[in-house]
Image: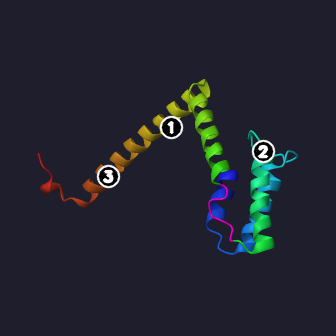
């Protein structure tokens, strides 16, 4: 969810909308009372950085840089990579992977069968190789 909000922020061009979006991100992901709170070290420093950016815009009309969430985004990326690396070692991951491979194999067989049936349906019998 944070990742999606972060990517959406990058496409906002209106400065007021950026401020609203940044405040929403703080409320949803950085505030310690949020149910979606990110697991970040030094949350208060990250929140202060965002609030300072908002303050500079409101007081001095300083544009909000599109990369003002970059540091938090990188920390979340590192967490996601770590979580996935741990998940790969679980039996649940092995079960899901095996299931996906089985489903993929079944789809390939179905596609091959359909393709052959299609070829046979449109190819006159006397032109088929012997």
Of mark 2 and mark 1, the one earlier in the sequence is 2
Please tell me which residue is depicted at 37% across the width and 41% down the height of the picture.
Answer: 109
Of mark 3 and mark 2, the one earlier in the sequence is 2
Q: Secondary structure at mark 1?
A: helix
Q: Main secondary structure of the magenta part?
A: loop
Depth-wise, is mark 1 or mark 3 nearer the camera? 1
Q: Which residues are magenta?
A: 63-69
Q: Nearer the viewer, residue 5 or 129?
A: 5
According to the picture, the residue beneath numbered tag 3 turns out to be: 115
CB under 8 Å between discs 2 and 1: no
Residue 48 image point, x, y percent: 79, 53
User: CA separation, marks 3 and 2?
Assistant: 56 Å
Picture disc at residue 100: 1
Picture disc at residue 43: 2
Residue 15 falls in which quadrant of the image? bottom right
Q: Nearer the viewer, residue 65 or 116?
A: 65
Q: Secondary structure at mark 3?
A: helix
Report the residue that reaches farthest toward the right.
33
Label 1: how many Cα within 10 Å (few below 14, some 14–19, many 20+): few
Please tell me which residue is depicted at 65% across the width and 63% down the height of the picture.
Answer: 8
Depth-wise, is mark 3 or mark 2 nearer the camera? 2
Of mark 1 and mark 3, the one earlier in the sequence is 1
Q: Is residue 22 magenta?
A: no
Residue 63 falls in which quadrant of the image? bottom right
Q: Is residue 74 left or right of residue 101?
A: right
Residue 62 falls in which quadrant of the image? bottom right
Q: Is residue 16 above or below residue 52?
A: below
User: CA separation, marks 2 and 1?
Assistant: 38 Å
Residue 33 image point, x, y percent: 88, 46
Please tell me which residue is depicted at 69% across the width and 67% down the height of the picture.
Answer: 64
Depth-wise, is mark 2 or mark 1 nearer the camera? 2
């Amino acid at each position: 969810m944070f990742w999606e909000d972060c990517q959406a922020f990058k496409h906002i061009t209106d400065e007021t909308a950026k401020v609203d979006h940044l405040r929403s991100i703080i409320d949803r992901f950085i505030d310690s009372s949020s149910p979606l709170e990110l697991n970040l070290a030094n949350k208060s420093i990250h929140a202060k950085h965002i609030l300072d950016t908002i303050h500079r815009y409101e007081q001095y009309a300083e544009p909000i840089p599109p990369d003002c969430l970059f540091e938090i985004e990188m920390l979340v990326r590192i967490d996601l990579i770590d979580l996935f690396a741990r998940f790969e070692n679980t039996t649940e991951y092995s079960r899901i992977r095996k299931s996906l491979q089985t489903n993929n194999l079944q789809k390939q067989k179905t596609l091959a069968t359909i393709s052959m049936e299609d070829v046979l349906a449109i190819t006159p019998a006397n032109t088929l190789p012997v």
